[in-house]
Amino acid sequence: MNNTAIDFLTYSYLGVTHDQCDWEMLLANSIDRACKDATNQGAYNTRVKEYMRKKSAEQKAESKNELQDIFRELFSDKKMVYDEWHKKACSRLLEGFKGLPFEYGNAQKWVNMTSKYLYIAYSLDLLKGHEKDVLEKYMRDFHVPIDSYILEGLKYTDIDCQIESSTWSRWKDSGKYYELQDVLRKRFTRNEGTVLVWENKLWTAVAQYRKTTDKASIKETIKDLVQSSESVEVI
């Protein structure tokens, strides 16, 4: 692996390199980038009316700081049940954004993309010591960041889980959200240790499908990814 090339990408996206990977900086930058994913364009930003913009900007800044504390708690020595921690994180975000067009769909995307960026850093051997150990403990419980790409891919599956809306950012029902996550984790975790491996493959395949003119072959790839039911317990 060419670390110089990897460092260029990780610094561009997360502000860290193999030689300079401060945990607090990585966490803050992951949260900041995930915020953009969760609130980009029609998912949130274009729905914020003129009179809401000052409050929205202030709340984003406040919630970024609050999420750092919430993730620090997960990465502390406390024993946590991941789903309970996740519900708390989303609830805190929703409470802060009360009165703004911010729904459970936005909250889950923010929390889940932060976890995904930390997992990517782990996969690239950027995490060391305690943080690496903690991520390995919880990564099998991580959630799929639900967005239009994932929902499009799930159209080809027989998963028996009612999806509330095809517009992920408008999701309000946390119960249906957690039902879907439970199904996805049980079905697609396999032996990689986290459902995010499957999610990465599906998201990329759908992104390729949207851009290619040769849609037939990519569609078959998507179908293969979502119709497999193999699930291997990870020790």
Image (tube, grey):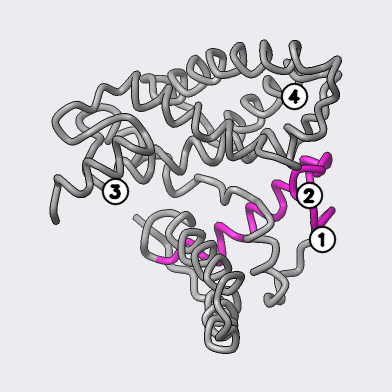
Q: Quadrant of the N terminus?
A: bottom left
Q: Residue at x 82, y 23 (%)?
A: 100
> What amino acid is found at the position of numbered circle 4 in the picture?
Leu
The residue located at (57%, 71%) in the rendering is 211
Does residue 211 sit above or below 162 in this rendering?
A: below
- Front in this rendered view, residue 104 or 46: 46
The disc placed on residue 162 is 1
Looking at marks 3 and 1 on the same chain, the residue that comes earlier in the sequence is marked by 3
Real-space Cα separation, disc 4 to disc 1, in angstroms: 23 Å
Asked whether 24 or 69 is in front, the reply is 24
Q: On the image, numbered disc 3 is attached to which residue?
A: 123
x then y, percent, for residue 97:
76, 20
Q: Residues within 10 Å of mark 3 (few under 14, many from 20)?
A: few
Q: Which stretch is magenta?
A: 164-190
The amino acid marked with disc number 2 is: Lys
Within 10 Å of the Cα at label 4, are there few (<14), some (14-19), or many (20+) other Cα atoms? some
